[in-house]
């Protein structure tokens, strides 16, 4: 991590926080309540950590107005401490690119357009017709196919593979190993086996979208696959052809969305969930991890499926009983009948 | 997309369809029934879309003989409209490589054999003993290890990593990020921890196989991992060592097949399914999405597992009840006993 | 595979096995009991294969003392035949790198430190501050970010993407497509959408760790993500930020561990399992494949979840009944009440 020092007063101003305590205190970095030292800033957002507040050695703490009342040390008072912390993390990110340069070891087609202050790493391959907007960073060994567009200030990490005809908005982050615009899984059955259907649509990615490592987003069959503004996708997610993911939806790692499904805005999809094809998921739906969505979800709310972990011996019994549920139901019905005829 | 124009007569002949209407009508591209314009061709394959037929603005529609009867516009009559559409998509695929060239920025070992009309992108690394057959295309930054073979007209997209001793047949398509021939997960437990077992087998991929983005196929332990002719694998599939996948089987995204399992021919495996190791799945088995296969499936048919999505509050009740099934069964048994002794 | 020949005496000594039979017998390779020829060595470890022993054509067999008694042919007697086999596989691994060289087509920052006998493939990109220890091998087109460390004799296969500030121990193997140090999935909700939290922690990988193809390991938010010595990770595993995986734990393909979860030492996690965030899994826990872990597991033992595969028609019934369990329980309660009041 970089050794970068700021005064508490500077940090308070940056996030519009109220400062209580020594405004000239110097801060070298961020840490947790438990581990922070006297030159580090920390925060309290989750009530479960409140117990660590009184014992922290931190130079200062970002606190809500309520928590700040009981705290005697230096603090930045903010109505949303987690958000203030999120904003400050970028000050200490050693990963910022400070000089923009285009590597002589990149291959850039002469018919590509490269904006101002663009950074292109060694081994990058950029095809004809590609447009890279100002301030974008393309990491080493990434490949960008014909006529694709990368928006302003978007960061593409090393080893990202973007096919032809893919449009990525501005201020996006695409982690390594992501593949955008690969062929949708479209085949027609025939007597000679599967006949491949050329995938003629593209992929449209909005602004401020995050795409995780090794996530794959297929191009559309005829129309486009669409990821709207502000969507955040974790690692190893699979987005099939013609899926639409609505604005500001968050999807956790290893989830998969099958072809032509539309997911609404402001949804939260837990990790390793699966959503079948040709469905509609309403705005504001929250799906817990590992859920199997096999019908459309028309209303906002929390949805789940699956059976949670059990000791293996209990699980075996549950499963065996589950298979005998039908006969249990029959027996119950018979008893009811018997009892009712007895009583008559 | 390319602006490429064909007459309806030409298209009809290409797919051996009967033409009804204006044979000189010009077609610039393909679209859906709802979105097609007067210079576009569309198709009706799924009965659910029949309702859009009468209102389509398409220049022409590919129809079955039955659907064509009631349609007054231009049409191509074919017994399998979806297949005819699939064949025609390739006319408008802007992704065709038209000139074959070998990039000076590729590293090709002098002991590799490169066939006629092969295209090799910048940054490709080809080891000694590799054979690339005529017409194959190797995308930018892909790596092919020692003694591997790529068949005629096979297309390897950018960023594919093929280890040594992997054989890929002809007319295959391998999407970006796929890894073929990585080590199978073989380790012997010992007092010093896990002892790695060198994986001495290879990978054999048949002809006309599709391999999706970020799919991984491990090499065999002693014998080979085998993907037979005509198999289609979607994105992010995991094929473990010594798996055999039979001819024309289709596997949807994010499924995983554990070591030494044999999947038969003409199977359809739904997305995010898992098949445990050392099992046999018969020819013609259809497994629905997210199924957990923990025993061999000896007969063709449709198989499933899992509990579908519910509102979270209902799910919590279902799960709680599932855990109490055992006691419910006991109570039911007791009631039966009681009732029968009452009656005696 | 290489044609490499050893005498049985040599092989016996190498693994400290007792030799019974012709010590000058020549062995060209390894095979299975069923397929081995007269110049091949095989082994019997799994009792299920005992039936093939008497009919094997192998030149020699690695056997336990018990199995060796009944076998008349050449054999190497070892208390752990599978371990002896594991050790010998490396003799025939055609994948060994024998000459160490640094490709002129690699880009290595002048402020990187490269140890003795290091091998670096074409297209590798190594940033400033990187340290590669003696005997390490970096495969073609891999990228290593600023200040990262690769330990002695570690093998990084082609197309591995390692971010800045990642430390990999010695004697590790990292398969193609793996991504180490990508950003953890950390975002603060705000009125303007998701605010990205810079991920300031790193990744620490111990010694003798195996990382499978296309596996992703995210960097920590403030502290590090940690994979301890001797851990083996299969393909397409997702390790989120601040996860700790304990010594010698084995995780099968396609499993995912969510943020801040600690998995103990000597665990075995079956394929496609998911472990939710902020949990603790004790040492010695065994989780079967496709299990959904949504609470901490405090004691060693075997754990499971999920409903195994059924014919689709039976499954539909099970699911329907599962949804009616609540009403079944009510009916059962009513019957009990009724019967007891009758008896009173």
Image (cartoon, coloured by chain):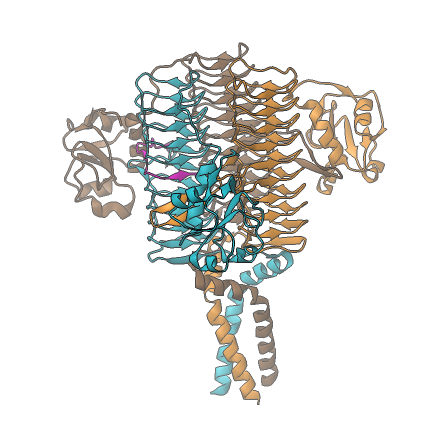
Chain colours: A brown, B orange, C cyan
**Magenta portion: prevailing SS class:** loop
**Residue toward you, C121 or B111:** B111
Residue B266 lies left or right of residue B312; in this view the side is right
- Residue at far top of view: A110
Position of residue B17 measured from the top left corner of the image (x, y, whole percent) = 82, 31
Residue drawn at 56 percent across, 42 percent down: B223
Residue A252 lies left or right of residue C242; in this view the side is right
In the figure, C82 relative to C170: above or below? below
**Residue toward you, C337 or B318:** B318
In the figure, B29 relative to B309: above or below? above
Position of residue C31 measured from the top left corner of the image (x, y, whole percent) = 53, 44
Position of residue B303 measured from the top left corner of the image (x, y, whole percent) = 62, 54
How many marks do you count on the picture?
A: 0
The image quadrant that residue C120 belongs to is top left
Position of residue B280 measured from the top left corner of the image (x, y, whole percent) = 60, 52
Write the start and end of the magenta stretch as one range.
Answer: C196-212
The image quadrant that residue A308 belongs to is bottom left
Residue drawn at 58 percent across, 15 percent down: B102
Q: Is residue C235 visible?
A: no
**Residue toward you, A168 or C96:** C96
Q: Is residue A151 visible?
A: yes
Would you say residue A102 sits in the magenta stretch? no
Residue A188 lies left or right of residue C290; in this view the side is right
């Amino acid at each position: 991590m970089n050794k970068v020092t700021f005064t508490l007063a500077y940090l308070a101003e940056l996030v519009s926080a109220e400062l209580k305590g020594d405004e000239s205190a110097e801060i070298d970095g961020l840490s947790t309540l438990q581990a922070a030292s006297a030159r580090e800033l920390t925060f309290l957002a989750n009530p479960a950590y409140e117990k660590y507040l009184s014992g922290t050695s931190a130079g200062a703490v970002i606190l809500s107005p309520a928590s700040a009342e009981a705290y005697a040390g230096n603090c930045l008072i903010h109505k949303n401490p987690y958000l203030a912390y999120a904003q400050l993390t970028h000050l200490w990110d050693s990963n910022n690119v400070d000089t923009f340069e285009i590597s002589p070891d990149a291959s850039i087609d002469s018919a590509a357009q490269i904006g101002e202050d663009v950074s292109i790493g060694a081994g990058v391959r950029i095809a004809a017709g590609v447009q890279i907007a100002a301030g974008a960073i393309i990491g080493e060994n990434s490949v960008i196919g014909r006529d694709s567009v990368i928006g302003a200030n978007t960061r593409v990490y090393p080893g990202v593979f973007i096919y032809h005809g893919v449009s990525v908005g501005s201020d996006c982050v695409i982690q390594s190993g992501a593949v955008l615009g690969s062929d949708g899984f479209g085949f027609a059955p025939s007597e000679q086996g599967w006949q491949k259907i050329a995938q003629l649509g593209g992929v449209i990615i909005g602004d401020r979208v995050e795409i995780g490592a090794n996530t794959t987003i297929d191009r559309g069959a005829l129309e486009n696959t669409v990821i709207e503004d502000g969507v955040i996708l974790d690692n190893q997610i699979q987005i099939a052809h013609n899926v639409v993911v609505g604005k500001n939806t968050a999807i956790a790692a290893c989830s998969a969305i099958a072809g032509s499904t539309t997911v609404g805005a402001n949804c939260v999809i837990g990790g390793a969930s699966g959503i079948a094809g040709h469905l509609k998921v309403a705005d504001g739906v929250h799906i817990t991890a590992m859920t199997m969505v096999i019908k459309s979800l028309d209303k906002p709310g929390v949805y789940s499926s699956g059976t949670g972990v059990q000791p293996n011996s209990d699980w075996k019994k549950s499963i065996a009983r589950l298979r005998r549920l039908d006969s249990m139901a029959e027996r119950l019905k018979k008893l009811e009948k018997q009892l009712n005829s007895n009583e008559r």
